[in-house]
Image (tube, rainbow, N blue to C red):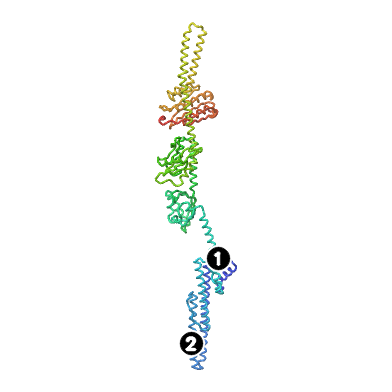
């Protein structure tokens, strides 16, 4: 029996235990198989003993019969006695042998309830005693196994079988079971420690970690979920997780779940969740499905602030780009209101400026009129801080440590704006304060430039009028007086007549010079005939031939536009004659898309520098004072081209 595979397994297990080599220990299933093999071998021994006992009994019976036959002749009495004794012996042998055989068979079949009652003091009685001892030992061994199984079920991994109560192979078997139990306990301890470490990481992670099922429910979430979404863990586990997804993103999430159901992994997928307080947050997900378990292991990161910062920076760049391009201030302020509305997911926003009298002027708006918005603007002016009034929120715009204005937003529906809107609006307003200040400074500069140009034009008109009504009239009167004096000198010396004629010629020249000066200060033809006749008059008086191509509307353009174009053309013709050494000048003027475009080009030497003299700088100031733009291209040796684009009202353009 010891040389059988089961016996070798037991021996190998014992040697492995002695050597402390746990890697060679058999599994629990292998151990039970070896134990069963050993019991089977014991049953085979019992069967062999039964056969041998039966053989011995038969042999003895034949011997008795032989002796009876030999002694039959001695006496009938002896024969009868021997016969009676033989029958009695046969009966006394068969009954215990049958009982022992059945008991051995029951024991071999694993039935420990069978009891051998034969207690004779013969060899069969000894065999019966041996089987009874084996029966008891087997019951005790089975009880130890049951106790160990119960300990495993109850997670009492420190339980050990009582090896001292057994001897021999039974003790070795229990010792092997105790070693197996110890190894299992050590492995369970390592697994428990690993689970504790994993749970610590799971619970302490700042990222959102979860295990969800393909059935649409969270199975486990870490505390970061509760902190980020504002729901208790029981709520997150009891409701389908699509309930927490923003309704506009649910179709995309369903599509992602369909992909995960096929076993595909998903990385860096972003969607919106609705927090417990009703605000939105953006989560970026990485998911790995385990189809055979019906689970999805997922990790998420709250990217709300990074997306918000990106949107704020994009909005700031958009506004700064408009300021850098010189877009009119009202367009800049309207763009600011639009960007604020997009940032806070509302279509109602406005940029206000506080005037000296306390009134608030709307500079740019995407705001529907609301009493609460006006109250929010007044509250910001009073407190200098971001405030909330009903469904409206306002934040101050501070420029150079001075309350310049405010940005006001309102909820488009009956629901109030989300919590934190005040701080978000205040932060963004602080970012765009510089852009607003630049746009406002540009507006103030344009207004100041327009006032300066208007004042200069008014001074020119006043001087022209004073010259026309005063000095010119005085010169005309002197000329008439001189002509009268000349008519009275018929009998006077020739020298006197010649001197009077010389004085008359001087008065005529002075009158012509004064007339030219008067026209240069403010041309009368521009006031009387408009831009077209004035440009034709300039072309006729120009020292350089001028080619005109005018496509001007029939109606008069605004005076400031006509004056600006006149002086730009006059300065260009003067420069072409004095500096460019041009042979011809082309002047084209036309109105399209609410813009008057004037292009003046010559074939002179070029090389003009816009910042090199006061003439072009003055023209630039005059054009920009009207809201237009002046461009000069003057490559050396290739002439000079000046392009002026001035805005004109639609009514005038038509």
Please tell me whether mark 1 sits on a helix, a strand or a loop. Answer: helix
Can you tell which mark lies on residue 5?
none
Residue 479 at x, y = what percent? 47, 13
Figure check: 400 above or below 164: above
Of the 4 image quadrants, the one containing the C terminus is top left
Q: Residue furthest front?
A: 382
Q: Position of residue 589 (x, y in %)?
A: 45, 28
Q: Is residue 307 above or below residue 38?
A: above
Query: Which of the image's four quarters has the N terminus?
Result: bottom right
Dividing the picture into quarters, in which one does residue 165 lie? Answer: bottom right
Foreground residue among 389 and 552: 389
> Are the residues at dot 1 and dot 2 in contact (C-beta closer than 8 Å)?
no
Q: Position of residue 34 (x, y in %)?
A: 53, 70
Q: Position of residue 402 (x, y in %)?
A: 49, 38
Q: Which residue is mark 2?
A: 88
Q: Residues within 10 Å of mark 2 (few under 14, many from 20)?
A: few
Alpha carbon distance from label 1 to label 2: 59 Å
Residue visible at 43% across and 50% down in the picture: 250
- Judge the density around disc 1: few (<14), some (14-19), many (≥20) Cα neighbours within 10 Å: some
Residue topped by disc 1 = 183
Does the image show residue 564?
no
- Taking depth in this image into account, of 391 and 105 the one nearest to the observer is 391
Q: Earlier in the sequence, mark 1 or mark 2?
A: 2
**What's the residue at 52%, 57% (across, down)?**
200
């Amino acid at each position: 029996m010891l040389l059988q595979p089961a016996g070798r397994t037991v021996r190998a297990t014992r040697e492995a235990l002695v050597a402390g080599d746990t890697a060679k220990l058999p599994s629990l299933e292998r151990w039970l198989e070896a134990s069963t093999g050993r019991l089977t071998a014991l049953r085979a021994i019992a069967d062999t003993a039964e056969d041998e006992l039966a053989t011995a009994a038969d042999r003895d019976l034949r011997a008795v019969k032989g002796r009876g036959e030999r002694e039959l002749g001695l006496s009938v009495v002896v024969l009868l006695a021997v016969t009676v004794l033989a029958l009695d012996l046969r009966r006394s042998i068969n009954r215990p042998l049958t009982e022992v055989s059945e008991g051995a068979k029951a024991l071999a079949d694993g039935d420990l309830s069978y009891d051998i009652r034969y207690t004779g003091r013969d060899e069969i009685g000894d065999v019966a005693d041996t089987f009874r001892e084996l029966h008891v030992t087997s019951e005790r061994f089975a009880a130890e196994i049951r106790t160990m199984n119960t300990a495993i079920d109850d997670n009492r991994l420190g339980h050990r079988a009582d090896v001292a109560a057994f001897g021999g192979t039974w003790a070795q078997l229990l010792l092997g079971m105790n070693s197996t139990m110890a190894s299992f306990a050590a492995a369970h301890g390592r697994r428990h420690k690993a689970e504790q470490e994993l749970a610590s990481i799971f619970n302490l992670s700042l990222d959102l970690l979860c295990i969800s099922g393909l059935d649409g429910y969270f199975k486990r979430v870490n505390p970061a979920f509760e902190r980020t979404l504002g729901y208790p863990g029981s709520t997150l586990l009891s409701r389908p997780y699509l309930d927490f997804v923003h309704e506009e993103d649910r179709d995309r999430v369903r599509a992602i779940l369909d992909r995960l159901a096929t076993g595909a992994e998903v990385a860096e997928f972003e969607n919106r969740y609705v927090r417990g307080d009703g605000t939105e947050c953006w989560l970026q997900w990485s998911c790995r499905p385990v189809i055979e378990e019906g689970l999805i292991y997922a990790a998420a990161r709250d990217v709300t602030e990074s997306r918000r910062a990106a949107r704020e920076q994009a909005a700031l760049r958009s506004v700064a780009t408009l300021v850098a391009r010189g877009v009119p201030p009202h367009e800049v302020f309207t763009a600011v209101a639009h960007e604020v509305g997009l940032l806070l997911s509302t279509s109602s926003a406005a940029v206000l400026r506080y005037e000296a009298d306390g009134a608030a002027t709307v500079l740019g708006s995407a705001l529907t009129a609301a009493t609460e918005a006006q109250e929010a603007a007044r509250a910001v002016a009073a407190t200098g801080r971001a405030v909330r009034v009903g469904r409206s929120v306002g934040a101050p715009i501070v420029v150079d440590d001075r309350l310049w204005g405010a940005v006001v937003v309102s909820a488009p529906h009956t629901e109030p704006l989300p919590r934190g809107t005040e701080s978000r609006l205040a932060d963004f307003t602080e970012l765009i304060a510089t852009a607003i200040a630049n746009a406002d400074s540009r507006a103030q500069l344009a207004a100041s430039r327009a006032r300066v140009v208007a004042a200069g034009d008014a001074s020119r008109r006043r001087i022209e009028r004073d010259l026309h009504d005063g000095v010119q009239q005085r010169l005309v009167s002197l000329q008439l007086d001189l002509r009268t004096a000349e008519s009275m000198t018929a009998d006077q010396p020739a020298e006197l007549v010649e001197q009077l004629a010389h004085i008359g010629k001087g008065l005529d020249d002075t009158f012509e010079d004064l007339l030219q000066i008067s026209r240069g200060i403010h041309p009368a033809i521009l006031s009387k005939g408009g831009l077209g006749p004035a440009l034709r008059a300039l072309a006729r008086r120009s020292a350089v031939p001028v080619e005109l191509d005018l496509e001007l509307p029939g109606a008069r353009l605004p005076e400031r536009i006509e004056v600006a174009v006149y002086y730009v053309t006059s300065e260009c013709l003067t420069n072409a004659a004095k500096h460019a050494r041009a042979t011809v000048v082309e002047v084209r003027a036309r109105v399209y898309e609410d813009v008057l475009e004037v292009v003046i080009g010559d074939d002179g030497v070029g090389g003009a520098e816009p910042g090199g003299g006061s003439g072009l700088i003055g023209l630039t100031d005059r054009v920009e004072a009207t809201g237009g733009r002046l461009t000069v291209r003057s490559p050396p040796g290739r002439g000079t081209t000046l392009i002026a684009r001035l805005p004109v009202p639609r009514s005038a353009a038509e």
